[in-house]
Amino acid sequence: TAQEIITQAAVKAGLPPEILHSVAKAESAYRTNAISPKGAIGLMQLMPKTAAALNADPYDPKQNAEAGAEYLAELLEKYKNDPHQVSKAVAAYNAGPGAVDKYKGVPPYRETVKYVNRVINDYNKQTAKKQPPSD
């Protein structure tokens, strides 16, 4: 299933599966055949240039998920010493690292702000479910 592909891609890239699931949900709702108005392809909504840079066929769900995971891992690495690492990496996944660097944080684009909030909220929900209840 698409969910299994995402989990496997996250593990392969050394990411918590929850973050990749949150991005895949926000990007394509796990639709392997999704194409955005801007030309982003598949599950992780890779732009053709990004897919090419990562040597992935964006129409192959497994390659698409693995390339998306690799790209997100690179972005998380880029911002690793930043207190806003995850929101910056997720914003860069959506709007590009150039926009994040230009605005020194989440760019003030309505779509990107909504996207980052949706991904972070979903990620927090998923990770909260995994926590044992504290007494």
Image: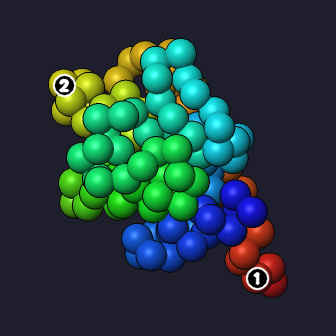
Residue 76 vertical position relative to residue 16 in the rendered view, above or below: above
Q: Nearer the viewer, residue 118 or 26?
A: 26
Q: Quadrant of residue 118?
A: top right
> Which element type, helix, strand or loop, lies under badge 2?
helix
Pointer 2 local density, CA inside 10 Å: few below 14, some 14–19, many at least 20: few
Query: x and y percent of residue 127 in the render?
Result: 66, 66
The residue type indicated by label 1 comes to Pro
Residue at numbered disc 1: 132
The residue type indicated by label 2 comes to Lys
- The circle drawn on residue 62 is none
Identify the residue at image location x=57%, y=54%.
61
Is residue 64 visible to us here? yes
- The circle drawn on residue 102 is 2
Does residue 74 appear to the left or right of 28 in the view shown? left
> Which element type, helix, strand or loop, lies under badge 1?
loop
Pointer 1 local density, CA inside 10 Å: few below 14, some 14–19, many at least 20: few
Query: x and y percent of residue 18 in the render?
Result: 61, 63
Identify the residue at image location x=46%, y=23%.
39
Is residue 26 visible to us here? no
Q: CA distance from mark 1 to mark 2?
A: 40 Å
Identify the residue at image location x=53%, y=52%.
60
Identify the residue at image location x=47%, y=30%.
40
Is label 1 or label 2 in front?
A: 2
Q: Nearer the viewer, residue 86 or 31?
A: 31
Query: x and y percent of residue 70 in the render?
Result: 36, 60
